[in-house]
Amino acid sequence: MAAGKKLVIVESPTKAKKIGGYLGKDYTVMASVGHIRDLAQPSQVPASKKAKFGRFGVDVDDGFEPYYIVGPEKKKTVAQLKSALKDASELYLATDEDREGEAIAWHLVQTLKPKVPVHRMVFHEITPSAIKAAVGKTRDVDANMVDAQETRRVLDRLYGYELSPVLWRKVGPGLSAGRVQSVATRLIVERERERMAFVRSPYWDVIAELSAPDAQGENVDFESRMVSLGGSRLATSRDFTSTGALTAAAQKDNVCQLDEAQTKAIAESLEHAPFTVVSMESKPYHRRPVPPFTTSTMQQAAGNRLSMSSRQTMRAAQGLYENGFITYMRTDSVTLSHEAIEAARESVTKNFGKEYLSDKPKQYATKTAGAQEAHECIRPAGSKFHDPAELATKVPSDQLKLYTLIWQRTLAFADGRCHWFHRHRASFCACGQSGRSHLPGFRYRHRVSWLPQGFRLAASFLFAVCSWFVRCCKSEGCQGV
């Protein structure tokens, strides 16, 4: 590299290429390709240190001191970085601003031993303005974050080396369990023991399939579930304990636990009976836009809506981040910068119209206990958001789907209005064939938007006398989670 150039080290070659284009010819940007050193495997510990570090790569008897080595696959990368550093005037460590990124920066300093000024350069999105701003506002490596990452890594090693062999013997080869998986394994074992000890208890439901004309005179089919008989509430799954007995609350309420014979008798007696609405409840409620994405909520939404696993989601997000399309994807914050709020409101106006904007921007606060909030939420990068259509030919399909999801979530947040709905609940009664069996126990719930009065008549079929037929279904009692 030319003398006097500034060396910038990032994690991935993709980021290096992108950031190098933004910084220009006075900078050389290289990639460490993740961590350049790690805890030694027992077989990699020198004979002179076997007594202290030979079992875990950690001295468990003296402050849990770790023993780090540069792995064989990283020696070429380290040699290239050292060679580039010889002619550099300054060193910028531009790894991610989280525990792992901070640890990578610290290990680079410990391994390269630079004799030029060292700057810790951080940014939350890979855009020209963000990168240039980061160069002008650097800091030192955060020792507290380095210690936090080292503690996590040591815990992974201590737990993993003890628990993983158990999984190999009991479950299958190649599995591992560290500080996170060990807790998950314990939860699974406890739940499995509860499942094995669970005692089933049968209960029966009666469901009526009803039909009535709507406001346009067309028949609408809907279901109504029997909820009480003779003034007593029918038993449901939550009324049973794990031993199959009724809960104390269910016994106090004197719930009615129908058996098969009783249920069939009820169904037969009501086979040709009319159903009549005897009461109607209507309660308004509202929904606000959900907060922007954090890492966990993005993974949940991608799983539910795109059928993407957590690994697939994070891989797609990594690609979007490295190419400058979204902000950093590992965050527990739901806050948006002023620049992002303005960009979101501009996109809403452009794509949907001003009528979909709230009167003033809304900002969510993170309520998760212990949240770091080192970054913004996950959102489209820059001061002007790319429409998903603009990325259709620039990114793979999985990244496009995920970007669209992030874009939609961010724009929905910019619409800070409440959306009102009505929740309706109608109660029915029915008379048996003999005319002596009065069953005020069927209930139907229906949800509609908050509409002008004239349109609310669309729900008026709830008050009709319905022609119907009954079907009964058997369920098994199950333990609540």
Image (spheres, rainbow, N blue to C red):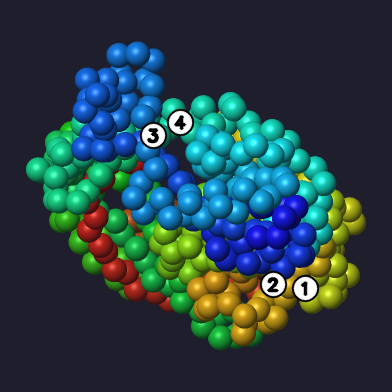
Image-quadrant location for residue 15: bottom right
Task: Give yes or no for contact between labels 1 and 2 (Cβ–Cβ under 8 Å).
Answer: yes
Point out residue 139 in the picture as x, y percentages from the top left corner: 73, 36
Work out which residue is located at the far left of the displayed protein and give it: 169
Residue under label 1: 454
Q: Earlier in the sequence, mark 4 or mark 2?
A: 4
Placement of the N terminus among the 4 image quadrants: bottom right
Amino acid at pointer 4: Glu
Q: Earlier in the sequence, mark 3 or mark 4?
A: 3
Q: Earlier in the sequence, mark 1 or mark 4?
A: 4
How far apart are the two marked residues, 3 and 4, measured between alpha carbons? Answer: 11 Å
Residue under label 2: 457
Amino acid at pointer 2: Leu
- Residue 271 visible in the displayed image: yes
Report the side of 369 relative to 35 (left or right): right
Residue under label 4: 150
Report the side of 425 relative to 75 (left or right): right
- The disc at residue 68 is 3
- Viewer-side residue, 430 vs 115: 115
Image-quadrant location for residue 101: top right
Q: Nearer the viewer, mark 4 or mark 2?
A: 4
Amino acid at pointer 1: Gly
User: Mark 1 falls on what kind of element?
Assistant: helix
Q: Earlier in the sequence, mark 3 or mark 1?
A: 3
User: Mark 3 falls on what kind of element?
Assistant: strand
How far apart are the two marked residues, 4 and 2, measured between alpha carbons? Answer: 64 Å
- Viewer-side residue, 164 vs 50: 50
Work out which residue is located at the far top of the displayed protein and give it: 62
Report the side of 176 relative to 388 (left or right): left
Amino acid at pointer 3: Tyr
